[in-house]
Structure formats: C-alpha cells, structure tokens
Image (cartoon, rainbow, N blue to C red):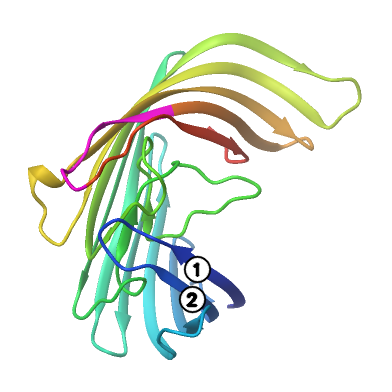
Amino acid sequence: MGVGISRYPVSYDPENAIRTEESRDELRLYVRPRFLRWMELSLHRLKFEPLEDFGDHDTEFWGAIALNRRFKYASTVITAESYSGGRTSLFGNVRFLFGSEIYSTFLLQAGRSWGDTTPGHGTFRVGGNTGEGYFTQRPSRLFALRGFSANILEADKALTSGIEVYWPLINIQRGYKTLPLFFHRLYLGTFLDAGICSETITRGDRLVGAGVELITSMEVAWGNFSSFRMGIAWPIDQPDHLDEEGTVFIFQVGRPL
C-alpha cells in the first residue's frame, strides 16, 4: 500500500474550451495486490482553487482501477474511474512493436467520460509530444499528437493513434572516458499521428501531423536504458476552426525506446 501527496498548478488554454488555471492538492492512496502486480486499486481526493481571483473552489473524490500489462511485443494501460458526483471515465492506451533492425511501433490512445464534465475535470486533451523524460511527465488525460501544440483541444471524448518507423543509422556502442554513459545506436524515426477530440466524433474533427526524429538509445549509470530524441513535426490536416501553421520542435531525454 502506498500514499501519494502532491500540489501542482494546472494551466492551459485549448482552442475549443475556456482556459483552465488551477492550483491542485491531490491525495492518493493505492494498493497493488500481491499476486496481481499488474493491477492497482486507488482512492483519490482532489482539492482545487483558481490561480487567479476568479474560478471554482471545490473538492472531488473518486476511486480507480488501473491495469498495466506488458507482453513481448505489446503493452497496455487501462484505467476506469468512478466519481462521487456520478461521473465515470474510461481511458488508456495500447502499444505494439514490430520488426527488429528496422522496426516500427503503433500507439493507440482513447478516453471517454460519462456524466457532467467541466473543463479540466473529466475531460481529455490532445496535442504535443508522445514521450516522457527525466524532466517531463505527461498527464494521463493528455494524449499525444505531434505537429500540434499540447492541450490544443479538450472534450469528453478523445482518440489518437501514431505509427513510427525507426531506421538504424549508426551502431555507436561506445561510451566517453569514465562517464557513466554508454551510447548504443542512432536511429532516424519517421512518424504519422492522427486523432480526434470532440463531443461528437466526426471526420471533420480530425487532426493529422507528421515529422522526423533523431533518436539515440543509451545507458545511463550502468543499467538505466534511456533515449535522447530531437526532431520536428508539422500539421497536415486539421478542423476548420484551427489554424495551426509552422514547425513544432521535439526534444526529450529519458524514456527508453
């Protein structure tokens, strides 16, 4: 059994909803059954208040069941939540890995809420980079869609997918002097992301982005496998009410390939 206590600000301004600016205090109690380590049961309390003078002050309570399974060529995370006010949510992702030397990944993320939702509470968001690093962590309700700014759209339904192909460039396999850092391989990643975030899922709500990345797989402090990513992405297709232009830069250090 574990306890998590956190205080953090939330600030974002989607194109299709009002701005969310809150200070949040969250208490989380969780347990992972001894013989079902891929399952987590948790209870949450969230107290929030506006960062500025105007906004709601309230407290939310909910329970959650999260399933996290890893297989040889796939992994999946699914979370179900039930709130004291009657709202329920279901969201998660599944990732597949194909190939060996030249390999590819397919990521599908989806979420939906039933009941009363307000911006920042019970909703899902899309946009931004796919990964997490040593210095960044994606909120569970923010689904990646490269080529667009993070939190660009918000709604009670969201669906995104992405496919990426990794092309080996250089087999480095060396470190630098006595530093606890060892580089493995340098890849070129090419990707295509697509998704929808809307109360009504229609073809006209579709967003599509594409881009390229340079990825170096590396080992930090003897045994911690990580990656360094740097790339660019751009929008290809978007709803009529959006006008995203230009290049979005991608930079990430931390999560393994």
Answer with left or right where residue 8 lies relative to residue 74: right
Answer with left or right where residue 45 lies relative to residue 114: right
- Quick check: 154 above or below 190? below
Answer with left or right where residue 156 lies relative to residue 61: left
Q: Residue 70 carries which label?
A: none
Q: Say which amino acid is labelled 2.
A: Glu
Please state the horizontal and vertical placement of residue 143, each as a whole percent of the image.
Answer: 36, 51
Crowding at mark 2 (Cα within 10 Å: few <14, some 14-19, many 20+):
many
Earlier-in-chain disc, 2 versus 1: 1
Q: What element carries label 2?
A: strand
Answer with left or right where residue 227 lies relative to residue 84: right
Gap between marks 2 and 1, in whole Å?
5 Å
Q: How many marks?
A: 2
The one of 75 and 231 positioned closer to us in this rendering: 231
Asked if marks 2 and 1 touch (Cβ < 8 Å), the reply is yes
Residue denoted by label 2: 22
Q: Is residue 191 visible?
A: yes
- Quick check: 123 above or below 142? below
Residue that lies at the very extreme toward the right in this rendered image:
178
Q: Say which amino acid is labelled 1.
A: Val
Residue at left offset 91%, top offset 26%: 178
Q: Is residue 106 found inside the magenta-colored segment of the image?
A: no
Residue at left offset 56%, top offset 28%: 230
Crowding at mark 1 (Cα within 10 Å: few <14, some 14-19, many 20+):
few
Segment tinted magenta in the rendering: 233-241
Task: Please identify the quarter of the rendering in which residue 115 is found.
Answer: bottom left
Q: Which mark is residue 10?
A: 1
Residue at left offset 55%, top offset 71%: 9
Q: Is residue 99 visible?
A: no
Residue at left offset 58%, top offset 72%: 8
